Amino acid sequence: MAVARIDLHVHTSHSEDRERIVLPHGASVTMPFHPTLAPCEVYDLALQRGMTHVTFTDHDTLAGGLDLLDQHPCPDRFIMGEELTCWLADVPLHLGVYGLTEADHRLLHAGSERSDKETCCLRWNLPELLAYLDQRGLVYDLKHPLWSRDGRRPSHEQYLSLFGRFALVEGINGTRHRWLNVLGAALARRYGRPELGLTGGSDSHTDNVGRCYTETSGETIAEVLAALRAGDCRACGPHGSHRLLERDTRAVIASNISQRAGQVIALADDQMQELPTLAKELLSLLVTGVVAFGVVQEFARQRALAREVAELFACELEGGVNDAKELVAAAQGSPVHGHVRRD
């Protein structure tokens, strides 16, 4: 069967994202982090980069996919997808869901605006959510399994429960530090299902589509989904880096200002022209410093999280377990080398 390549973690301009940068002395800045490319641009770029099939994983919306189907002259390689926010107790998780319909989307989010959403919305009940996805035959994977927002990560027992529930886990995320990717893949192989498949995705918010991807098999969309459902896949591509994240952050900030601020940016441009050259340079230096600080801080947080998770599992993995060396190395702060592959 033909080899298929698909970036299973891609965002379009329809994703509503925000990032918080914590500054010294407890201050913080929350900025819009909306992706830069329209759906048609993402689709065409993915094919140019060698992807045989394309999906979007915008946060909790199908708007990007529906826009593509409405605007693109030939979207015949497109698989509808969504990055679904759900919860395990009070811990937020992100699932990639593929091949879903608008009716599926509405049902998954039904009740999410109610005050008692924890009892009536599928996204707040992980077992029922996964049961629905299985009953519908939808393909889904657990995104960046070790990453956590605002310090809310699963406990040891919750990690074990999570890995046992998923047949597909994201092994390479193009924006995450290699320690988090390698650790997540090692734990998934150790505690996951026998038929486990590791997926790869760029998590692109700019033009990084296809930098990381999932290699599987199939020519038609149905064949590709069937191969993924069977765990017949492997994660490909490099891990995240400071340089890439800083580049993307600059690009997203510039795009958000120029495309979303309307008349405000025109006024700002007029004011900038009135500033002395030195003032412009100082303002540019300030922005550069804030972005650089935020990027360094984010990767430091990811390394610390990798050590923390490794320490949760290092004792029980010591000895003859193949992945113990990687886990202990990460816990001690040593570099971890190599890409994630299926055993």
Image: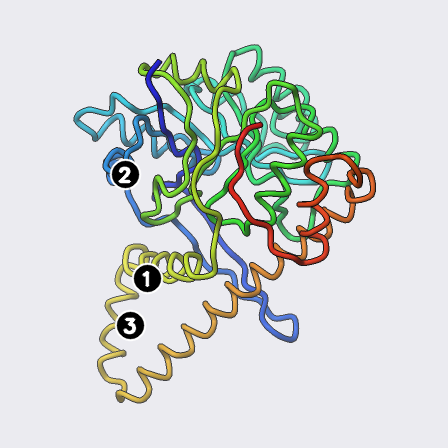
Indicate which disc residue 49 carries: 2
Q: What element carries label 1?
A: helix
Image quadrant occupied by the N terminus: top left
Amino acid found under the numbered disc labelled 3: Ala
198 above or below 259? above
Dot 2 and dot 1 residues touching (CB under 8 Å): no
The CA span between labels 2 and 1 is 24 Å
Q: Which of 16 and 198 is in front in this view?
A: 198
Residue 274 screen position, x and y as percent: 23, 84
Count of numbered labels shown in the rendering: 3
Amino acid found under the numbered disc labelled 1: Ala
Amino acid found under the numbered disc labelled 2: Arg
Indicate which disc residue 254 carries: 1
Residue 67 screen position, x and y as percent: 29, 31
| 137 displayed left or right of 63 | right
Which label's residue is closer to the chain start, 2 or 1?
Answer: 2
240 above or below 165? below
* Residue drawn at 69 percent across, 33 percent down: 88
Indicate which disc residue 268 carries: 3
